[in-house]
Image (spheres, rainbow, N blue to C red):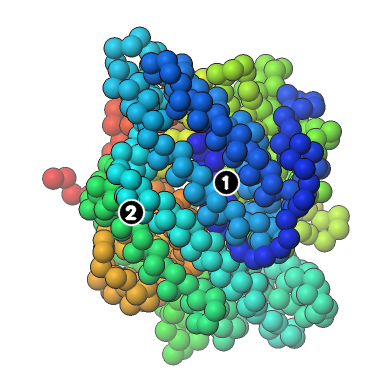
Amino acid sequence: MDRRTFMAASAAATAFAGAAPMSQAAPSTLPLLAAWTGPHNGAPPFDKVAVADFKPALLVAMEENRAEIAAIAGNPAPPTFANTIEALEKSGQTLNRVAPLFGVWVSTLNDKPMQAVAQEMAPILAGFQDEIVQNGPLFARVKAVYDARETSGLTPEQRRLTLVIYRQFARQGAALGLDQKTRMAAINQRLATLSTTFSQNELTDEESYVLTLTGEVDLAGLPTQVVVGAAAAAKDKGLAGQWLITNTRSSMEPFLTYSSRRDLREKGFRMWAMRGDNGGAHDNNAIITEILKLRAEKARLLGFPTFAHWITDDQMSKTPDAAMDLMIKVWEPAKARVAQEVADMQALADVEAPGTKIEAWDYRYYSEKVRKAKYDLDENEIKPYLQLEKLREGMFWAAGQLYGFEFVPVHDLPVAQPDVRTFEVRRDGVQIGLWYFDPYARAGKNSGAWMSEYRTQKRVSGEVTPIVSNNANFVKAAPGEPILVSWDDATTMFHEFGHALHGLNSNVTYATLAGTNVARDFVEFPSQLNEHWLPTHEVLSRFALHYKTGEAMPDALVAKIKKAHTFNKGFDTVEYLASAIVDMKAHLAGSTPIEPRAFEAATLKDIGMPGEIVMRHRMPQFGHIFAGEGYAAGYYDYIWADTLTADAAEAFSEAPGGFYDKAVAKRLHDSIMSVGNTIDAAEAFRRFRGRDVTIDALMRDRGFPAPAKA
């Protein structure tokens, strides 16, 4: 089976909690178990999903996979690639169909009954994963094929798959003794439960705390679109005539940027920053302490000094020291830039509001004013040109120029929710995949933006095309009006679409090696690189069109945007790196008990965190690292990938055709986008760039001084 698909389902199950009755449907009648059929090479049967069917469907799918695993492990024939590694790859197909649907409901339609299923299934899914990994006869066969991989006539891709699967088993404790395996299974199941509770607590604080605006005076400074969104949020809660700023990033950040009511900015900021840290039943601090303790024990069982060492051992970085070294090299100049940014803001505040000292709830507000003063650039001047649907068209167009893709709307596919739209992706008239777009915020949907994969490309048993989705949380506009987005939101759209393109371009044999199934500190590279096509003249001149006049964004405004590219990079970098450094140091602490509030404060003091900034994700709401192991000891991945990105972007900017240079685009496709994990990430980058990555381009891109040469 595709291990990433199963692990994604396990992670999705840890997202929420609750209690509800289960379906009594007979397994043979469950639509979730059926093969995907219909037009466009088959697609998920979203119209046949019943929440109560998830548990029985998952249990049946696991039992089917259990029988397949038993047959592979008990095969009397000597282990070969075909009867062991490839057999594993072909197993679990029913589970590979149920798991993505489960993930969609957990992440986008998570009502109370769904939360109940997720809570119950989290430890069961984790236990099943351990059951496979800890199967002694199975691992013995995997190891035999692994040991003979260089002499048994395997193709390079088969050798790579054998290596990857062997490491998946070995890194999860397949070689441990019985007592250690038993303890490992108990740890993993407890971690699944704790992560479920962590996510549920964070969700509860996001839904329970809101900033209510009751009169026109509370709306001072807010753009019309923010006011309209806040009114709609209030109406949804039965508070017509009022305005609600919800406790989510998409709602709070615009409020903090534009509200001229400093008292309300402080109130909203504190509410946002304290998610998961409010005491009582939904406080996450004790959960974090236990998670870190169990992860440290898990790492020791696996033979690593800390959880951070275990994580980085399988990444490009290889060691925590390498990750920390990069972060500190960027941290110091970023702090210096923050000092300059604060000085600029303080000078402006001294004139506008004498006696005001810049605080964390002031940073976004005054930085926007400084941007307008320094660069004559106002976000509200940009937004009228950034229509959500036009940007989507721009993403499609750029992908067509780079990869030859054509996105054709289709209307005969079932969807999980009426707002979701579907597109067939073609190259040279041949379908190569499907793309689903779920752009709007709603109750029960995770905040933020992300890419999901419903089906992974492979050809081990015939050609299977990928199905991917992009998900966002835009607030719907008034009927008949376009949704206008910020420049940052537009950048995020291109970023997440980059992940989708990574999946759609995949051209390998085995799903385990396909698309985004690459090293974790490499997976953000294609997505961050795709951001660079947004500010190109070719995209902006065609798709950044004023929503009223239809005129293209003026060259003068584009020039302002590009001139301000490095503006506020101190804040952006420090806010992110503070979280990444705290994450790494927490997972380097080993068996030392951690009290999150004290540890966070001490670590930030030790690295000289500017007082005017709060880390992007404080520990009690740091879902990236505590709602599962997704980015645990790996939040550094973004700066690692951004180092690759900045270097790769210069390959385009140096080329005769710029970002649309056909030769460089082909090299990107052939070396990075199509090969998945069939080759080592460092080698893939080397093939594209012709050399190893350096930090110099990253520092240039952020406007920081180059690091001193050793």
Left/right placement of residue 534 relative to residue 186 reads right
* Cα–Cα gap, marks 1 and 2: 21 Å
Pointers 1 and 2 in contact (C-beta within 8 Å)? no
User: Which residue appears farthest toward the left when viewing the image?
Assistant: 710
- Residue 643 in percent (x, y) is at 36, 43
* Residue 176 on image: x %, y %: 30, 43
Along the polypeptide, which appears first: circle 1 or circle 2?
A: 1
Residue 393 percent location from the top left of the image: 70, 38
Q: Residue at x 59, y 17 (%)?
A: 461
Depth order, front residue of 87/285:
87
Tag 2: residue type?
A: Lys
Callout 2: SS: helix
Q: Hey, which quadrant is residue 255 in on the image?
A: bottom right
| Dot 1 alpha-carbon crowd within 10 angstroms: few under 14, some 14 to 19, many 20 or more | many
The residue singled out by tag 1 in the image is 9
Above or below, comparing residue 140 to residue 254 in the picture:
above
433 w.r.t. 157: above or below: below
Q: Which residue is mark 2?
A: 298
